[in-house]
Image (cartoon, rainbow, N blue to C red):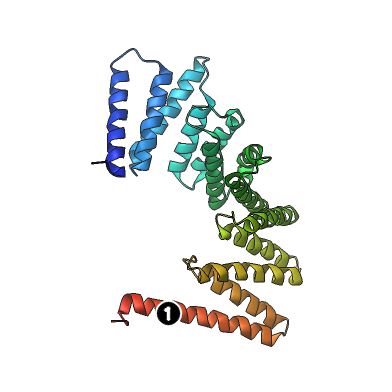
Amino acid sequence: MALSFDEHLEAVLQDCNDRINQLEDSDHSDIEMLDALINRGSVLSMMEYYTSALSDFEDAADLIAKIERKGESVDPGSFVRVFVSRGELYGDDGRMADDYAIASVRLGEVREGSKFYDRKKIIRMCLDCCEDLLDAGYPGATAPFVDKLYSLLVGHDDDWSRNRYVETLNVNAQSMKDMEMDNEAMGIFTDAIEAGTELVEKGSLEDLMSMIFAFVMRGDIEQKKGLIDMYLIDRKAAISLLEEMMSMNKLDDISVLVRLHQDLANTYLTLNMVKEAEEHLMREVMLNMDGAEEYIREYVGRDK
């Protein structure tokens, strides 16, 4: 019988423990121990043993410092993996941003063939770091990761790369928006919408939310700038895509759609366009009623 995922992880963890015990009992090199600590820390993190994982990555960071003090070089993949992993485990505080900043110093050296990374893993890691930094309120710290993403994505026309390119444009634009660089953000959100539209036309866009996000964020900036006609167009585009997702039962949370209808209703009221406002208010009410009906069916057992 095949092992379950959890059983597989337990077996890998045992192998990692055996490897570290073997190294501790032998005349091992620091690089060998570094790799073993990274491997075990990664498995522990996957198993959600976060305290133990953090301990391994802290030991790995200390070992990197020891190796570098001796004038020896650490593979850039190992270096980046340690500080990104430790930063992720620290969570959304200054220590995370500090570790991501340390990792970014050698990010440019990470290539296909570096330890622990291939091209797709580098791209996913950089996107995750950008999202973590944005969530934690460090938009300026995303720059080296965004630069790395562009270097790996520009010129690649396969669907996977183009989808990641849309995600990269969105995190870059969000960084600009958070730093109040609104004109730059608007331009990059426009690029994301155009790249996403190309994928939609091919039937290759993986997640409509990436387009919706760009329309909503660009609309927020347009509203702030008083570009009301452009704002209305972008809000309607986002609503149309959300309604499409809901019609295909792919919208897990209707709260965003409700809020956008409410936004449009409020804007139309300020413009004294009562008929248009009523249309969106009625849709908002219907969505909330649908949500209430679903709640009753699920939790009260009305269908029984």
> Where 206 falls versus 107 (above or below)?
below
Q: Position of residue 46 (x, y in %)?
A: 37, 42
Q: Position of residue 94 (x, y in %)?
A: 52, 43
> Quarter of the image containing the N terminus?
top left
Q: Tell me which residue sits at (72%, 85%) in the image.
A: 272
> Where 122 falls versus 136 (above or below)?
above
Total marks in image: 1
Mark 1 surroundings: few (<14), some (14-19) or many (≥20) residues within 10 A: few
Q: Position of residue 105 (x, y in %)?
A: 59, 31
Please tell me in which quadrant of the rendered image residue 39 appears: top left
> Quarter of the image containing the C terminus?
bottom left
Please tell me in which quadrant of the rendered image residue 37 appears: top left
Q: Tell me which residue sits at (56%, 40%) in the image.
A: 123
Q: Tell me which residue sits at (51%, 16%) in the image.
A: 72
Q: Position of residue 118 (x, y in %)?
A: 52, 33
Residue 186 is left or right of residue 238, and the answer is right
Residue 114 is left or right of residue 274, and the answer is left
Q: Looking at the image, which residue sits at the far front?
A: 202
Residue nearer the viewer, 74 or 95:
74
Q: Looking at the image, which residue sits at the far top?
A: 27
Which residue is tagged 1? 292
Q: Tell me which residue sits at (31%, 33%) in the image.
A: 12
Label 1: element kind: helix
> Where 60 falls versus 8 (above or below)?
above
Mark 1 residue type: Ala
Residue 123 is left or right of residue 180, and the answer is left
> Where 251 falls versus 201 (above or below)?
below
